[in-house]
Image (cartoon, rainbow, N blue to C red):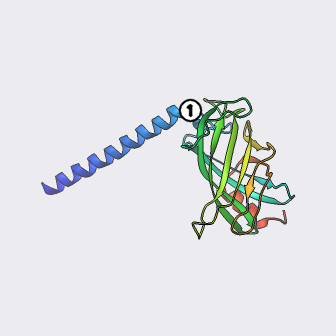
Amino acid sequence: MRDTRRMRSILKLVVALVLGGAIFYALVVALNPWALHMGGVSTPLLYWTGTGTLLAKDGKSYPLYVYLHPGRSASHLHRDGLKPNAGLGGSAELCTAPGTTELLKLSGTMYGGYRTTEGSLMDFRLLEWKVVDPQMKKGYFDLAGYWHGGTLAMTLPNSQGRTFLTGVHIEGATVTLQAASHDAFATACREWPSR
């Protein structure tokens, strides 16, 4: 009898969790239908990953990996004549030396499209993940650009940046991201800059 009650309680909990997850998923999709089809591919898990070689204003290049999904933060300002329609969240990794990466937090805004990313402007900041001393300012760099099919061309000029704790400084950066896995990025980072 006791085991039956326990099993019913567990079953109720599982059903509640599944139902709650389904409601949350439906809400995210209703607010961000573009997240189901990012970069010209079906993304039912509501995220997109891509890699590319970031080029800074000083001529240095770095392999970059981006993990992108709908997020909470969004600007309320228009950009390039487009109104903001979604917040962006995620993470990124920047290869700073062969086999060495810097973990970054991604936040930003999508402007333009609502049902698709095609032709939409993406504007995001990649912020240093950890800071040992809370008084220190985190390093960051900004990227902005447009989706063209499966390519996210983050090539709009004049992006800002602040030096990371490791001494890496990226400003005026551009990158063209193609859909790819983290494994592809890890391989590129191990082989960089000999590629």
What amino acid type is highlighted by mark number 1? Pro
**Residue 185, how many percent across, how many down?**
71, 58
User: In the displayed image of the protein, which residue is found farthest to the right?
Assistant: 59
* Element type where label 1 sits in the image: helix
Q: Nearer the viewer, residue 106 or 73?
A: 73
Asked if residue 47 shows in the view, the reply is: no
Which residue is found at the position 72% from the left and 29% from the top?
Answer: 81
In the shown orientation, is residue 85 left or right of residue 187?
left
In the shown orientation, is residue 18 left or right of residue 81?
left
**Residue 119, how many percent across, how many down?**
72, 32
Q: Is residue 173 above or below residue 114?
A: below
In the shown orientation, is residue 24 left or right of residue 127?
left
Which residue is found at the position 41% from the left and 37% from the top?
Answer: 23
Q: Quadrant of the rendered structure where residue 169 is? A: bottom right
Asked if residue 29 shows in the view, the reply is: yes
Other residues around mark 1 within 10 Å, as few (<14) / some (14–19) / many (≥20): some
User: In the displayed image of the protein, which residue is found farthest to the left?
Assistant: 1
**Residue 38, how many percent across, how many down?**
64, 38
Image quarter where the C terminus lies is bottom right
Which residue is found at the position 59% from the left and 36% from the top?
Answer: 86
Q: Nearer the viewer, residue 79 or 60?
A: 79
Image quarter where the N terminus lies is bottom left
**Residue 72, how many percent across, how many down?**
54, 43
Which residue is found at the position 75% from the left and 51% from the top?
Answer: 160
Q: How many marks?
A: 1
Q: Quadrant of the rendered structure where residue 76 is? A: top right
The residue singled out by tag 1 in the image is 33
Q: Is residue 167 above or below residue 109?
A: below
Q: Nearer the viewer, residue 20 or 121?
A: 121
